[in-house]
Amino acid sequence: MRMKKLILILTAALALASCAKQDAIYKQFVKEGGIIYPAKPINVEARRGYQRVVLKWDAPMDPSLRTVKVFWDGTSHSQEFNYADYPGGSIETVVDNLEDRSYTFSIVNYDGDGNKSLAAEITTSPFGESWLVSHAERTVKFVRTDGNDAVVTMNKPTDEVALTKFRYVNAQGETVEAGEVKANENEVRLIGAVKNKYIEYQSAFCSAEGIDTVWTGNWFRSDDPVAFRVDDFKATVTSSAYQYRDNLTPDKIIDGIYDDGDYRWFSSNASQYRGVWPKILVIDTKEGGDNVMTFNKFVFYQDPDPEGQTRRYIRSVNIYVSNTKFNPDDANYAKNYGDPVISVSLNQVDAVQEFVPADKPTGRYVAIVFRNSYNSSGFVDLWEFEAFGFAAKLAEQ
């Protein structure tokens, strides 16, 4: 019995000795009063940029907190800040030169004794090349002269387009980078841009949730050079015999006056001519050689009065282009004129209607053949006609 008690006493003594040794080891890592964790950063936000991220969080109210560190890629990269340098109530920093992938950022506060807080973490990813190349360029719909300048009409913006800028040649032969059109705009004027020269353009993109507007860096050339209108000071217009009324002669359709009823062409109202079809107008552009025009748009202007829809008489129309002069009294025009570049029916709703030929025809002469009319008496009433084009040979020089 005494032997059992002795064994128990020895066992307890050994256990106490062992615990005492372990407690001594543990105390090396425990501060008196327990581990101190300062307050961690709060209200952490991340905004995405192009190859960068902007981080923001609240400056602490606790004056014992002195510094803060931002870590990413584990602890491979870091930034350190002194809170005394940021009295404004918040800290904001840019982390740039980032790759096109996801990042987790850890933000840790430190007090004056070196105690560190638990990490406040946020995960986000910057915009990179893969994001940029997935966006399609906004494109040019049409570019034309307007006085001494050019006016560019853009197609609708593609996804996340912010701006488009331009590069062009002016009258002095200089290459100019100027002019910007926003996503909610569709036209821009290029000061001093000259006809027959191509323009270049590039767009910048910005995500709805992003902070950066990023230019692609790639210049794209317009499909056509700057187009010009048939020169009314040079060109002439003739009609089928007797197909005009008083002073409303065919030359009025290219005079540049769109909204004055005294400057338009009206077909004959004489009983023997008004029901005669076709009625034909032939434009001689007087452009030849290297200046011969390649046409890329035709525009009809009819009575502009909103109440004048019933006076928009033009219905079925063919347009022909050739270097051989057309006879406006050719009864067999369908055989002799060749294939039309445009064959359309106009509506009575729109006062202005434009048409783009599928194949851009080249020639000195343009014939407009009116095959019928919405008017039962056979009238045709054209206020203005625009034929736009460019000199292809000069454009390539």
Image (cartoon, helix red, strand yellow):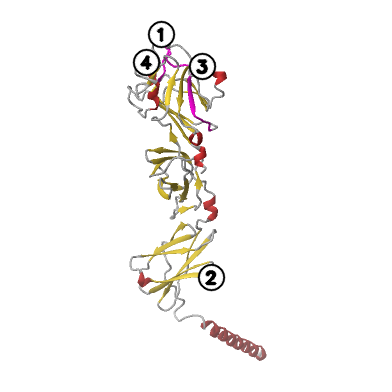
- Residue pictured at 50% horizontal, 58% vertical: 126
Q: Nearer the viewer, mark 4 or mark 2?
A: 4
Residue 76 marker? 2
Which is more foreground, mark 3 or mark 1? 3
Q: Amino acid at mark 1?
A: Ser
Report if the CB atoms under discs 1 and 4 are less than 8 Å apart. no
Amino acid type at circle 2 is: Ser
Q: Is residue 62 visible?
A: no
Q: Identify the residue position indicated by label 4 in the image.
A: 245
Which amino acid type is marked by label 4? Answer: Arg
Mark 1 lies on residue: 271
Q: Quadrant of the N terminus?
A: bottom right
Rendered location of residue 200, percent (x, y): 48, 46
Q: Say whether disc 1 or disc 4 marks the residue closer to the N-terminus.
A: 4
Q: Amino acid at mark 3?
A: Asp
Q: Secondary structure at mark 1?
A: loop
For the record, the magenta segment spans 360-381
Distance from disc 3 to disc 1, alpha carbons, whole Å, reads 21 Å
Mark 2 residue element? loop
